[in-house]
Image: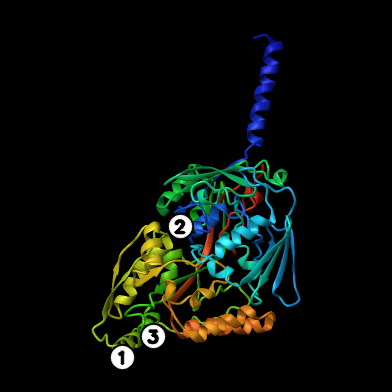
Amino acid sequence: MNRLFAAPVALALILAATAALAAKDTIVIGMQDEPPVLDPTQNAAAAIDVIFSVNVYESLTRIGEDGTVKPGLASSWAVGEDGKVYTFKLPKGVTFDNGEKLTSANVKWSFERAGAADSTNPTKRHFGNIAGIETPDPETVVLRLKQPSSLFLSYMASGGAAIFDPKSAEGNKNSPVGTGPYKFKQWVKGDRVVLEKSQTYRDAGKVQIRQATFKFVPDAAAQVPALLTGDIDAFPVIGATETLDRFKGDSRFQVVVGSTEGEVPLILNNGKKPFDDIRVRRAVNHAIERKSIIDGATSGYGVPIGSHFPPHHPWYVDLTNRYPHDIAKAKELLKEAGYANGLDINIKPPPFAYARRSAEIVASQLADAGIRVKIEPVEWAQWLDIVYKQKNYDMTVVAHVSPWDQDNYSRGKDYYYGYQNEAFDKLMKAVLAESDEAKQKDLYGQIQRMIAEEAVHAFMFQLPRTGVYAAKLRGFWKSSPVSVTDLAGLRWVD
């Protein structure tokens, strides 16, 4: 071969190979559950937020990795002295993926839509406290509240508070349009969602991942080979927790175990028999044994809980000893409630590994107390319809991953818990109106104790964040204070 020809060819091949190694700018992320729709203002499924919140859709604020409220779509805000007036400033020159400009009118329209009488927004209740919305100029939004709310800025970070363009809102359930660092590319139902970097994003130069694919792998056993073969680069919450030691010993991976905001209770339908009777609910609490559940469902990585509050929070009250494992006590309470011969109930777990495994262990434990449990597994879309919407269930298991979601217990018969308690409602109103942190801590302590005393559910564990990532991937959160994947913070290293 002519040396004058060979040298340039060899150099070109070397440069091409080097560029290929340096140019890795795509990622495939594994998820167990697929979102039923792609619009968080239409459905409560956390999987929607995991993919789209902060990536495609933006809200006025956002929650950072440390759990604090940070600027989101709003660049800054000011709060009036009475705690009832919030003035948000929007950055100039922001556009939606469809080319429409963002103005304060979009915020007003989005919030009025969310709080409308016919709204199906899962966070609709958060907008009921807004007395008025003013838009003095295109970059300024003034929200006037009826009552002060200690959680208002946190509420404004939710997917349900995402800011939409009216022209695209109806189509967002299948083809999302937002203002974030990524734009929607493809949804292959039953397989994947693909996002690509938005070149019109205001900080596009800081975004290193060009394309992100969220791959749905519902079978926990199938998640392992998908990682080992390189088909998936990251699984932030792997269902097969029993395989973590295997990945820890493989230099191709990094295992990062953190916490989530996901309290996992054995959920009891308080709105129907037999769980409208507190004695039956307390019997179930005495019949379960948390350690066995945690060992079987999360390979020991879960943290036991006794009420609805995360153990990693400084205001947490340890109530795990309120109902010690006591089969004799459980039988005594059932007898008092008129179930001396036990009772027959169903449990409808969704397809998450921790939920299905928990259901099996719980059914075995309750059998010792004379509670005969029929396990009726349902797929996620069925769970959202049958359990969440229709409230057609006796028991279920699911993590509640939103922060500060104790107000679910004040949603009464309209919420799938079916729990109603005026005393609790007063406590919730008091803590939301309170601005003093010491008093908030005391009120949240009372809230935790009341939920436990009422035995609304049988609380089991805090869902761990069991992440397995490619060794050269950086930027994933160790713990997840909210259900989001901050793609703009990810990068590959050599």
- Across and down, in percent, residue 390 comes to 37, 67
**Quarter containing the N terminus:** top right
User: Is residue 482 left or right of 264 when viewed as pictured?
Assistant: right
Tell me if residue 479 can be seen. no
Say which amino acid is labelled 3. Ile
Say which residue label 3 marks.
278
User: Is residue 439 left or right of 354 when viewed as pictured?
Assistant: right
- Across and down, in percent, residue 404 comes to 58, 72
Q: Earlier in the sequence, mark 3 or mark 2?
A: 2
Q: Secondary structure at mark 3?
A: helix
Q: Quadrant of residue 152?
A: bottom right
Q: Nearer the viewer, residue 79 or 488?
A: 79
For marks 1 and 2, give the CA distance.
40 Å
Tell me if residue 106 can be seen. yes
Q: Nearer the viewer, residue 36 or 207?
A: 36
Say which residue label 2 marks.
239
User: Is residue 137 left or right of 306 when viewed as pictured?
Assistant: right
Say which amino acid is labelled 2. Gly
Callout 3 environment at 10 Å: few (<14), some (14 to 19), or many (20+)? Answer: some
